[in-house]
Amino acid sequence: MLVQIVMTHSRGERITIETKKLGTAVVYGVLSIFIFGAATSLIFSLFLRFSSMDESSLTYVIMAASFISLFIGGFISGGKGKRQGWVLGGGTGLLYTLIILLFHYLGHDALFTMKQWISSICLILTSMMGGILGVNLKSGSRTN
C-alpha cells in the first residue's frame, strides 16, 4: 500500500512524499548500520584475539565506531530518500534503537539503563545529522 503525504513548503511549493520511498530509505540505512557493525565487530574480535589487549581498553573506540556507523546509516538513508534528511536519519536511528532495545529486553530480560538511553538519544541525533548531510550532498550533486 502506497501512502502519499502532501505538504506545503515555506515558499508555497507543494511537496509530495511517498511513504514507500521513505521506508525503503530507512531500511537501507538500518541494514548499512548492521553491516558496518558486523564488519567492525569482526575486526575488533580479531584484534582482541591476536593481541594482548582486553575489551575494556577498546570501550571508547567501540563507542566511536557506533557513532560512525549510525552517521553512515543516516547518510545512506538521507541519500536514498533525497528529502527530509532529519526525518530519514531520525527514523533510521530510532528503528536501530528499537531493534537493539528488543534484543536487550528479550535476551537479558531488562530495559535500558539511563546511560544507555542517553547514548541511544545521542546515536539518534548523530543519525539525523548523517541524514541531513546525505540529502544535501545527494541533491547538490544532482544540480551540478
Image: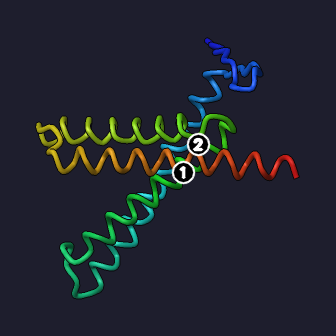
Q: Name the quadrant containing residue 66.
A: bottom left
**Amino acid carrying mark 1 in the image:** Gly
Distance CA(mark 1)–CA(mark 2): 8 Å
**Residue 75, placed above or below residue 9:** below
Label 1 vs 2, first from the N-terminus: 2
Nearer the observer, 28 or 137: 137
Nearer the observer, 49 or 40: 40
Mark number, residue 80? none
Q: Can residue 34 be seen in this view?
A: no
**Residue 22, placed above or below residue 139:** above
**Amino acid carrying mark 2 in the image:** Ser
Q: Return the x and y of residue 96 as percentages of the image width and height.
A: 39, 41
- For mark 2, give the secondary structure: helix
* Badge 1 vs badge 2, beta-carbon distance below 8 Å: yes
Nearer the observer, 129 or 80: 129
Q: Name the quadrant containing residue 121.
A: top left
**Residue 43, placed above or below residue 89:** below
Q: Name the residue under label 2.
A: 77
Mark number, residue 130? 1
Q: Name the quadrant containing residue 56.
A: bottom left
**Residue 74, placed above or below residue 27:** below
Q: Point out the image quarter for the N terminus.
A: top right
Q: Return the x and y of residue 141 as percentages of the image width and height.
A: 80, 52
